[in-house]
Amino acid sequence: MGAKTAGAVVEALLDRYGSTYAGEAGIRLADRPKPLYQLLVLATLLSARISADVAVAAAKELFAAGCGTPEGMRKATWQDRVDALGRGHYRRYDERTATMLGDGAELIIDRWKGDLRRLRDEAGGDERRMAELLMEFPGIGPAGADIFLREVQAVWPQVAPHLDRRVLDGAGKLGLPRQAGPLAELAGSGADLARLSAAIVRVARSKKSVDEVMAAAGR
């Protein structure tokens, strides 16, 4: 695929599917403790075998119930968290997830004083070490760490470009480069790279969506 055509595919992706998962959950992502914690909660919810729409809805319910900060999550009762997850239809995993979120809130408060920037600093800005530290949170495995890093690269330049295997495999389905460097060049900024990564993950799940994007790009 030529650079001009690849640019058209990226433009179609960003135009049609370019909202981040954080944005969908109402998180105004910035390099501040509260939105960074909310992104961690969302990454935890997205890690389960459940639809992204349900995970986003559950995150919104948790935040509306006062669980948008580590202190709020810790203060909420286990039943409060279960009820909020239930309102978001996150029912199959609600009890286990309510426990994990409570334990995760304790961890971030005790170890990093509620501020994930301290985790980043402890990792010395090293992406692999950040992933290892993120996986110390209950419910965050390799996929969850990738989700967090994929989105946080919009506000943590040290992380960009974070293009995990799921993004690169999806890019291949769209005829885009499967290599991080060339794909990052097509996106430009870290913010657009986060948006492009989310768009690729969404679209690659459905051949119909792939065909729609390719048609919009004039291919």
Image: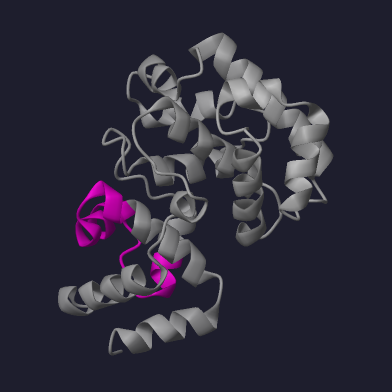
Above or below, 192 relative to 13: above
Instruction: State whether the magenta stretch is mostly helix, strand or loop.
Output: helix
Residue 179 in sight in this render:
yes
The correct choice, above or below, for 13 with respect to 24 in the image is below
Q: State the residue at coordinates (67%, 57%).
A: 54
Quarter the N terminus occupies? bottom left
* Membership of 200 in magenta stretch: no
Expressed as whole percent of the image width and height from the top left, the position of residue 111 reads 54, 11
Quadrant of residue 187 within the rendered picture? bottom left
State the count of labels.
0
Residue at 49%, 80% (x, y): give it: 209
Relative to 109, 127 lies left or right: left
Range of the magenta residues?
170-193
Q: Is residue 44 visible?
A: no
Image location of residue 36, percent across then percent down: 45, 33
Q: Nearer the viewer, residue 121 or 30?
A: 30
Could you tell me which residue is drawn at 22 percent across and 80 percent down? 5
Most foreground residue, 7 or 111: 111
Measuring from the top left, give residue 73's x and y in whole percent.
Answer: 65, 27
- Residue at the spot 72% in from the left edge and 26% down from the top edge: 76
Foreground of the two, 211 or 59: 59
Is 211 above or below relative to 80? below
- The location of residue 120, given as percent across then percent down, is 39, 23
Q: Quadrant of the C terminus?
A: bottom left
Dividing the picture into quadrants, the one containing residue 85 is: top right
- The residue most toward the left is 4
